[in-house]
Image (cartoon, rainbow, N blue to C red):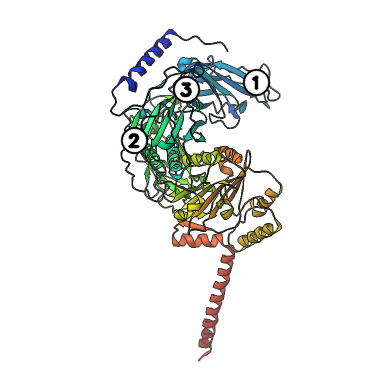
Amino acid sequence: MRRLPRPDFLRLSFMLLSIGLFLTSPNASRATTPEPPATAPHPPAAYRGFAKSFTFSELGWRRSVEISGTSMDRTAFFGVPPSQMLEQGQVTVRFSYLPQKAPIRIPRLEVDINETSLGTLPLPSSPPEHPAPQSATFRIPPYLVTTLNSLRIRVAKDPKHPCDTIYTGPFIRIDPSSEVSLSGIRIHFPNRLSDLPLPFLYHAMTGTRSLTFLMGHTDLPLLEAAGITASWIGLKSESSPLKFQAITGLPNDVGSLPTGNLILLAAAPQIPHWSFIPPVNGPTLALVDNPDDSYGKILLILGKTSGDVRTAALALSLGQFDASGSLSTVSNVVLPASRGKNEAPRWIDTRKPVRLDTLADKDQLKVSGTGSLPIRFSLPSDLFVWHQSSFPLWLHYRYAALPGEERSRLDLLLNKTFQDSIPLPSTPPGASDQVRTIPVSLKDLTPFRNVLRINFNFNSGIPGVLSCTANHNPRLQGTILGNSSLDLTGIPHYVRLPNLRLVPNGGYPFTRYPDLRRTAFVLPESPGEGDLRIFLHLMAFLSEETGSPGIYLSVTTADHLSEFRDRNLILIGTYDSNPLLLRYGKALPLDTPETRSRIRLESRLESFFRWSNPPPKAYGPEALAAYFKEDRNPLGVMEEDVSPLAPRRIILSLGGVSEESLLSMDRVLFDPRHFSDIFGQVSVVGADRIQSFLVPGDRFSLGHLPFLTALRFWFYSHPLGTLLALLLLSVILGTILSWILPGLADRRQSP
C-alpha cells in the first residue's frame, strides 16, 4: 500500500506534542514521593510502530447487514488510543447486491468517517441475478481520525434530485468480514498514576482488549489481589470485550518479560533484582516503562507481603492512593460500608420511581428536528414480573412543532418493541409542555440490560419539492424533562434457584451483594493459566455488571472450605485439580445404565408432582445423558446446584476436561453471542457453542411475594396440587352440604 504523505503541520504538531510530554513528565517536575528508576529512553525499532485491523463484526455488526431505501444508513464506532498516531488507514467494504423481483433504481452507498465522505460503492453494471461478492477499499486521511470515530455507510442523495425518496426493500448486503486497517507510530507517554486506567483501557476502545497479569506467586492473598484488580478493570472497561493472560512466576531476565502493557503483582521475596522496581516499604503502586518495550507500561502492585499486595489492590480499586506522580506508597485503606441486597450502583432502585435524568445526561434528553433519545438502564436480575402486565412511565415532555402541522408523533419503544405513540399537534409560538402516563409492557423487559427509546418524529406539511430538510428544521425541538420517571415499585424481588440464565444476565445470585461479601471462589491448590483466566475474567464481568469492585472477595481451596461454607461458592478447575467438582457436581459426563435410570425416574417425578410445563425432551435430563453418550468431546461443564453446606446458597461449578480446555472455555463462556444459550442447571461448553439442559434437583427461592401472588403462583406451578386442592375443597363442601341439607329437609317436613 502506498504511504500517505503527512502534511508539514502534522510533523510540527508531533514535535510540539513530544516537547510538551517531556516537560510534563515526572522527571521534569518535582515529586513528593520517591520515583522509580528511569528505564532506557530508546526502545527497539521493532516496537516504534503499530499496525492493527478489526472487522465490522468486532465493531458490533455480528451478522451480515442488509440495507434498504428505508434503513438509509448504518453506523459503527472505533477508537484509536491517545498513545498512537495514525499515518495510514483504509476501509475495505465487502458487499454483494441482492437480486430484485422488479427493476429498481439502486441508490449509491456512501462510506464516511466522522461525517466526511471517503467515496461511494460501485453500482452493478446490470441487474444482479444472484448475490456476487465484491469489495471496495477507501483510504482514510490521518487527520480525520481521533480517539473516537464513527464509520457510516449511508444512502447517498442524488445531487440532481435531492428530495427523491427511495422506496425499495433490501438491495445490498454488507459482509461482517469487512474491515478497518490502521498503521502509524506509537507515542511515549509519561508515567502518571493519574492517567489510569490508561494505557490499559481508554474511552472508545475497539475490539477485544488483552490484559496480561504477571503474578509472583499464587498464594491466596495474592490471588485475591489479582481478583480485586481484575474487578477494577471490569469497572473501568465500559462493556469493552476483555481477554486475560495470566503468567505465574517472574523471570530473572528482564528480557524475558512480555512486551506491551502489563500488570505485575508480587511480594518483595518474589521480586528479582530488576532495576525498574522501586523500593518496597509497604503496599505500593507504581507505573513504569516496560524495560523491553518503552512504549509499553507496567502497573506495579507490590508489597512486603502478599497481604500488602492485596491492600495495594484495594487502594487501586477504591482510588485511595496518591496519583500525583508515578509511585505511591499506600498508608491506609478505608473500606466503605457493605452494600445491601440488590444495591449495585448500575442497577436502578426499584423501591422508588427512577428519574430519567439519573439514567441519561440532560444533553441526551433533547433533539433538534426528528431524532431518537435512547435511555439505557439495568435491572436487578431477580424481579418477578409474572403477576402483572405493565409498569407506568410518567413522561413529562416539551416540543415545538411548525404551525399548521398535525402529523408529528412521539413514539416509544422498549428493546426495539413498540409501546405507544403520542400525537404532537402544532403548537403556538414557544414550546408546549405535556404530561402523559404510558403503560410499558413488562414482557418486553430483558432480565438485565434494557434500552428505552423515545423518538420525536416531526412530519412537516411542507411539500417535498420545496424542502427535503424540513423535518430537520432547528425550529422543531423535542425534550424529555428530567423529572420524567420509570416506576417499578410494584414489582417484587423473587426468583427460583438454581438458574444458570441469571449468571450472564447480571451475575446473579453472586451479585446480589455487589461487593461479593457473600461469595467465595474455590481454586485448585496450584491453579494453572486456564483457571486464572476464567477467575480474572469472571471477576471483571461481575464488576462490570454491578459497577462495584469486589472488595470483599475471598479465594480459598478445598482444604479451607469450611471457613466459607455459609457463602455462595464458585468452583473453578479441572476434575483432576479441584476435587470439589466431583464431590458437588451432579451432571458430570458419566453415562451408565444406573445413572440413566435414576435421571429418568427423577425427571418423571419432578414433572408430575411439582412443576408445570416439563422441559422439552431436547433439553431434558435424558438428552443430557444422550449428549455425553454420543462422545462429543466437550471442553467442560458449567453447572449450578444447591449448596449442601448451608441453606439457600448456590454452588456454581466451572469444570474443564483439561487445563487446555479451560483456556478455550474462557473464550466461549464470555462471548455475548452465547449468553442466550445458557439456562437451566447444566450448560455443556463446546468448541464453538453451548448446549444447556434442565435437570431435576433441589430448588429454593430468594425474595418475597405478596400472599395472594404467592398463592396464585403456587397453583400455577403445581398442577397436581391444584387438582388435589379442588378435590379436597369438593370433599369439604360435600361434607358441609351433607350436614346442612338433611336439617333443612327436616325443617320443611315438620308441621
Figure check: 351 above or below 104: below
Q: Quadrant of residue 404?
A: top left
Along the line of sight, the residue nearer the viewer: 155 or 17 = 17
- The residue at the point 68 percent across, 20 percent down is 127
**Element at badge 3?**
strand
Q: Amino acid at mark 1?
A: Gln
The answer to whether residue 385 shows anywhere in this view is no
Identity of the residue drawn at 71% across and 47% down: 630
> Which numbered tag is attached to residue 134?
1
In the displayed structure, 615 sits above or below 186; it is: below
Q: Where residue 57 sits: x, y (%)?
A: 57, 29
User: Which of the two marks, 2 or 3, is nearer to us in this view?
Assistant: 2
| Nearer to us in this view, 457 or 704 | 704
C-beta proximity under 8 Å, tags 1 and 3: no
Residue 281: assigned label: 2
Q: Where's residue 662, x and y in %?
A: 58, 41
Q: Which of marks 3 and 1 precedes in the sequence?
A: 1
Q: Residues within 10 Å of mark 3 (few under 14, many from 20)?
A: many
In the picture, measured across the screen, residue 205 lies left or right of residue 633, that is left
- Image height of 148 relative to 14, above or below: below
